[in-house]
Image (cartoon, rainbow, N blue to C red):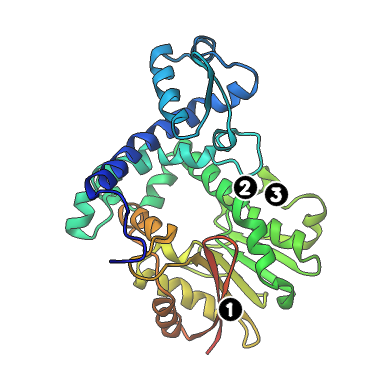
């Protein structure tokens, strides 16, 4: 028997997992229509909520009743609800909001591939690719509204983990840091705020840099220590920094594509520099971890994968890097510090 063996009967345990699907879909819908925001504005009764949000009152009540049974909202009087610490995180105006992540999880980009999970299980090919006839990022580039949902979700997640990552590692040791594939620059902004002696470079494709300028995470005082450089990491990575950072980039790709990216990094990293990968840690066999679940997202969405430390060690060695150390953070991310071999 494993340490985490369930104490309830097997059928009860599996039925509970089955209910998670319904709760997840309910959360995604509630996030999309903005119920938690409306409740916080003082609209508590489902009649008023349904009228303000153009929802069916009976369906809304049944949904909130189920969520309240899990501590997400609280029914304080018949058909009247208030926020709890859990539903508060679905608000759009709070630090650490997960609203954008749940909207993304409920979008067709994510939901449809999971309906076709068996296809990926049989073929090893992302069902997202089968459904759209192209890779996931090409599909997003053709769907501006969906791309914005994805962008909001990734920004939300980086905002959530950014302070912990910035505090876990001495980025100031490298003087100048390039964040490759850094999106809107929210993670880089947390690092620059924590380590005030370094300069930062945000490197991404041009249309992403345009959004970064609009978002303004690197504006104000940070603008004097930041530059933006166009970059396609399959083609070339801008030189000039001692350290290069990539968060959740390598996990999007299979080994061959990941090696292409890592070798482009190796061409520009000096002998006294470093490559810093921020990726999900994986727990021991038979133990749960968020990384193992995110790996299933990679299976159906991108064709990438979450890797063990040893798998990263081997992959990095093939790109002429030596994995120097693995730095834990207070999140599920680890920082894999690699030096030129």
Q: Which mark is residue 268?
A: 1
> Of residues 225 and 275, which is closer to you in this image?
275
The reply to whether discs 3 and 2 touch (Cβ–Cβ < 8 Å) is no
Residue 24 position within the rendered picture, expressed as x and y whole percent measured from the top left: 39, 38
> Of residues 301 and 194, which is closer to you in this image?
194
Residue 312, visible in the rendered structure: yes
For residue 215, what is the image quadrant?
Answer: top right
Does dot 3 land on a helix, a strand or a loop?
A: loop
Residue 239 position within the rendered picture, expressed as x and y whole percent measured from the top left: 63, 74
Residue that badge 2 annotates: 210
What residue is drawn where x is 45% and y is 24%?
64
Pick the quarter of the image with the N terminus.
bottom left
Residue 207, visible in the rendered structure: no
Task: Give the Cα distance between marks 1 and 3.
Answer: 26 Å
Residue that badge 3 annotates: 217
What residue is drawn where x is 26% and y is 41%?
15
The numbered mark, 1 or 2, whose residue comes first in the sequence reads 2
């Amino acid at each position: 028997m494993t340490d985490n063996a369930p104490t309830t009967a097997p059928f009860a345990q599996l039925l509970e997992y089955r209910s998670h699907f319904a709760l997840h879909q309910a959360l995604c819908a509630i996030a999309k229509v903005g119920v938690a925001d409306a409740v916080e504005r003082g609209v508590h009764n489902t009649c008023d909520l349904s009228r303000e949000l153009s929802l069916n009152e009976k369906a809304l009540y049944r949904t909130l009743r189920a969520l309240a049974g899990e501590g997400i909202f609280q029914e304080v009087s018949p058909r009247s609800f208030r926020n709890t610490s859990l539903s508060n995180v679905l608000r759009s105006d709070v630090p650490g909001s997960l609203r954008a992540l749940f909207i993304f999880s409920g979008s067709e980009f994510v939901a449809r591939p999971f309906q076709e999970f068996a296809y990926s299980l049989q073929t090893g090919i992302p069902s997202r690719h089968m459904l759209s006839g192209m890779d996931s990022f090409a599909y997003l580039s053709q769907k501006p509204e969906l791309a914005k949902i994805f962008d909001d979700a990734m920004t939300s997640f980086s905002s959530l983990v950014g302070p912990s990552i910035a505090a876990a590692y001495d980025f100031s040791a490298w003087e100048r840091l390039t964040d490759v594939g850094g999106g809107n620059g929210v993670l880089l902004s947390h690092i620059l705020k924590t380590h005030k002696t370094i300069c930062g470079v945000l490197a991404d494709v041009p249309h992403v840099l345009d959004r970064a300028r609009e978002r303004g995470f690197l504006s104000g005082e940070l603008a004097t220590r930041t530059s933006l450089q166009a970059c396609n990491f399959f083609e070339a990575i801008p030189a000039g920094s001692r350290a290069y950072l990539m968060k959740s980039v390598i996990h999007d790709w299979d080994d061959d594509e990941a090696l292409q990216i890592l070798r482009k990094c190796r061409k520009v990293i000096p002998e006294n520099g470093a490559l810093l990968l921020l990726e999900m840690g994986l727990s021991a066999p038979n133990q749960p971890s968020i990384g193992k679940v995110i790996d299933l997202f990679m299976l159906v969405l991108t064709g990438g994968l979450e890797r063990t430390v040893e798998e990263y060690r081997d992959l990095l060695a093939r790109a002429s890097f030596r994995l120097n150390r693995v730095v834990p953070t207070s999140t599920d991310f680890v920082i894999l510090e690699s030096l030129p071999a």
